[in-house]
C-alpha cells in the first residue's frame, strides 16, 4: 500500500514536471494556466440555513386498505419486481413507462424484460384507488427495503378480464427527488468551501424572508421566526469576523419590515439587508408595493446599510418596464448606499430576461446619476450545465462590459445537495465567460464598499 501511494505520488510529480516543461514552450498553455489561477477575493452572494428554516419533510399520503382483489394485484406487482417472469399480471397489450429511458415497454414479453432489471424486495404502498366496472386504478408510493420514505410514486391502470381477474393495463412511475434543503448550512461549512476555492471572504445574506414568503402558506409566529433566523445567521457570521459579513433578510411588504430593519441595524456585524422581491411577492408595477419598497429603501439609506436585492419578480412579463420603474422610483430614495442587484437582475441558474439588465446597462452607459451606487453580482448566471448557449454567454459578457467590470461581484448562493459550493461555480464562470484574463481579474479583485 505504501509503495502504491509512493508510485502514485511519483507519477503525479512526473506529470507536473512534464506539464511545466510543455507550458514553458507553449505560450497559449501559459495563458490558460494564468487564467486558471485567477480566484475572487470575495463571494458576495452566499446564504446559510438555520435549523429553524430546514423544511420538515413532506410525508406521503396515508396508506390505505385495498379491497382483497386489488390488494392481490399489488402484492403480485411487488413480487415480480426484479424477476423476468411477470406471468399474467400484465394485460397482453399493456404498456409500462420506462422512466429511466422515457420510453414505453409494450406487451408482456417486453415488460418482463423491464421488470427483471428492477429492485427486488420493494414495497408498493397504496394511497388511493378507484373502481368503475371493469376498470380500476391504484396510486401510491414505492419503497426500497428498509426505507422510511417513498422513492417513487406509481400509478397502475387495471382492466378486468371476462373471468373477473384484474390485470395491469398501464403503469407509470416518477422518481421523488430528495429535498433541496434537508439540513442546516453553517458558517463552518461555508468557510471550508471558501478555503477549498481559495476565496478569502464572503457576504452572508440571511434567508429570514422565507418565513414571510408569498410562495408558501402563512406560518405561525412569522415575525418571531424571521427574528430567530436573522439572529442565528448573525451568530454564525460572528464566529468568523475576518471572513464573513452579515446581511439581515426580511419581506419589505410586511408590517414588521421597518422594525426588523431598525433592530438588525443595531447588530455590530450588520452591513446590509437582503431583499428577494419574487419570494416576497413584490411587484413594482403595483403602486402600493412600490410605495412600501421605497419606504424600506429610504429607511435603509437612513441607517447607511447596503441592500442586496433580487429584483426579478413573479411576473411572467418581468423585464424592461420593471427595471425602469426601479431606476426611476427606488434608486433615488437611497442615494447614499450601495445597491447590489443579484443574478444580473435575473434569477439564475442562467441569465435573463435580458430586457431588464439591458435597461440598467443603458442607464449606466448614459451617465444616469441615479445609478452611481448600483452594483451587480453574477451569481449562477454562468451555469454548470453544458447546454448554456454561446450566444447567452456572449450577451452576459456584453452587459458586464457595459455596466463596467468594477461594478460586478462573484457569488454562488447556498451550497446544498442540489447546488454546488463556490468553487465549481467560479470555475464555470472563469472557463466559460468570454472575457479576457485582464477583465476577469478585475471582477475577481472587486471588494464591495460595504466590506471596506
Image: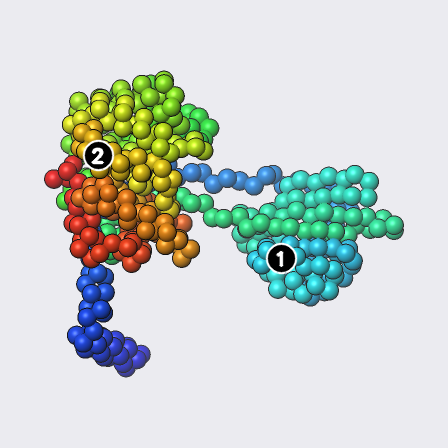
Residue at the (36%, 40%) spot, across then down: 354
Badge count: 2
Quadrant holding the N terminus? bottom left
Residue 86 is marked as none
The alpha-carbon separation of the residues under discs 1 and 2 comes to: 54 Å
Task: State the scheme by which the image is colored.
Answer: rainbow
Point out residue 114 in the picture as x, y percentages from the top left corner. Answer: 65, 62
Q: From the viewer's perspective, tell me whether residue 316 is left or right of residue 149.
A: left
Name the quadrant containing residue 236: top left
**Which residue is located at x 36 percent, y 54 percent?**
390
Upstream in sequence: badge 1 or badge 2: 1
Q: Is residue 205 left or right of residue 96?
A: left
**Which residue matches tag 2?**
366
Q: Using the image as rendered, state which of residue 113 and residue 102 is in the foreground.
A: 102
* Figure quadrant of the C terminus: top left
Residue 4's place in the image compared with 130, above or below, is: below
Q: Which residue: 42% across, 45% down?
A: 180
Q: Is residue 194 visible?
A: yes
Crowd rating for badge 2 (residues with CA inside 10 Å; few <14, some 14–19, many 20+): few
Tell me which residue sits at (22%, 56%) in the image: 436
Q: Is residue 430 left or right of residue 321?
A: left
- The residue where tag 1 is placed is 103
Image coords of residue 266 (percent x, y):
17, 26
Q: Relative to residue 122, is residue 57 drawn left or right?
A: left
Q: Farthest residue in the front direction?
A: 366
Which image quadrant for residue 220? Answer: top left
Task: Spot the residue most to the left.
Answer: 452
Against 191, is 129 above or below? above
Q: Secondary structure at mark 2?
A: loop
- Examine the rendering and report whether any part of residue 306 can be seen: no
Amino acid at each position: 500500500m505504501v509503495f502504491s501511494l509512493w508510485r502514485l505520488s511519483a507519477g503525479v510529480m512526473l506529470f507536473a514536471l512534464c506539464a511545466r516543461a510543455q507550458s514553458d514552450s507553449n505560450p497559449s498553455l501559459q495563458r490558460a494556466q494564468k487564467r486558471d489561477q485567477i480566484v475572487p477575493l470575495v463571494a458576495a452572494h452566499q446564504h446559510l440555513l438555520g435549523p429553524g428554516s430546514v423544511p420538515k419533510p413532506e410525508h406521503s399520503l396515508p396508506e390505505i386498505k385495498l379491497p382483497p382483489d386489488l390488494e392481490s394485484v399489488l402484492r403480485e406487482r411487488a413480487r415480480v419486481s426484479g424477476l423476468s417472469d411477470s406471468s399474467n399480471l400484465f394485460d397482453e397489450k399493456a404498456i409500462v413507462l420506462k422512466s429511466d429511458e422515457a420510453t414505453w415497454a409494450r406487451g408482456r414479453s417486453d415488460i418482463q424484460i423491464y421488470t427483471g432489471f428492477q429492485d427486488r424486495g420493494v414495497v408498493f404502498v397504496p394511497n388511493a384507488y378507484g373502481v368503475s366496472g371493469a376498470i380500476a386504478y391504484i396510486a401510491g408510493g414505492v419503497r426500497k427495503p428498509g426505507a422510511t420514505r417513498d422513492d417513487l410514486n406509481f400509478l397502475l391502470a387495471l382492466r378486468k378480464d371476462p373471468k373477473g381477474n384484474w390485470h395491469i393495463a398501464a403503469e407509470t412511475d416518477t422518481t421523488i427527488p430528495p429535498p433541496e434543503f434537508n439540513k442546516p448550512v453553517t458558517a463552518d461549512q461555508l468557510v471550508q468551501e471558501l478555503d477549498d476555492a481559495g476565496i478569502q471572504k464572503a457576504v452572508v445574506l440571511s434567508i429570514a424572508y422565507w418565513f414571510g414568503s408569498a410562495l408558501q402558506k402563512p406560518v405561525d409566529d412569522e415575525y418571531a421566526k424571521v427574528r430567530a433566523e436573522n439572529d442565528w445567521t448573525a451568530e454564525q457570521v460572528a464566529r468568523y469576523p475576518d471572513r464573513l459579513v452579515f446581511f439581515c433578510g426580511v419581506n419589505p411588504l410586511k408590517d414588521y419590515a421597518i422594525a426588523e430593519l431598525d433592530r438588525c441595524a443595531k447588530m455590530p456585524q450588520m452591513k446590509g439587508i437582503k431583499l428577494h422581491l419574487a419570494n416576497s411577492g413584490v411587484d413594482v408595477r403595483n403602486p402600493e408595493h412600490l410605495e412600501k419598497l421605497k419606504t424600506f429603501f429610504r429607511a435603509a439609506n437612513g441607517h447607511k446599510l447596503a441592500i442586496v436585492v433580487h429584483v426579478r419578480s413573479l411576473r411572467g412579463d418581468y423585464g424592461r418596464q420593471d427595471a425602469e420603474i426601479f431606476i426611476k422610483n427606488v434608486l433615488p430614495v437611497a442615494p447614499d448606499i450601495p445597491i447590489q442587484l443579484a443574478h444580473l437582475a435575473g434569477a439564475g441558474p442562467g441569465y435573463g430576461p435580458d430586457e431588464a439588465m439591458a435597461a440598467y446597462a443603458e442607464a449606466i452607459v448614459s451617465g444616469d446619476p441615479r445609478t452611481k451606487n448600483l452594483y451587480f453580482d453574477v451569481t449562477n448566471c454562468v451555469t454548470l450545465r453544458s447546454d448554456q448557449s454561446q450566444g447567452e454567454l456572449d450577451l452576459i459578457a456584453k452587459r458586464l462590459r457595459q455596466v463596467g467590470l468594477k461594478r460586478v461581484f462573484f457569488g454562488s448562493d447556498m451550497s446544498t445537495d442540489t447546488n454546488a459550493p463556490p468553487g465549481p461555480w467560479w470555475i464555470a464562470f472563469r472557463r466559460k465567460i468570454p472575457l479576457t484574463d485582464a477583465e476577469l481579474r478585475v471582477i475577481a479583485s472587486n471588494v464591495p464598499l460595504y466590506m471596506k
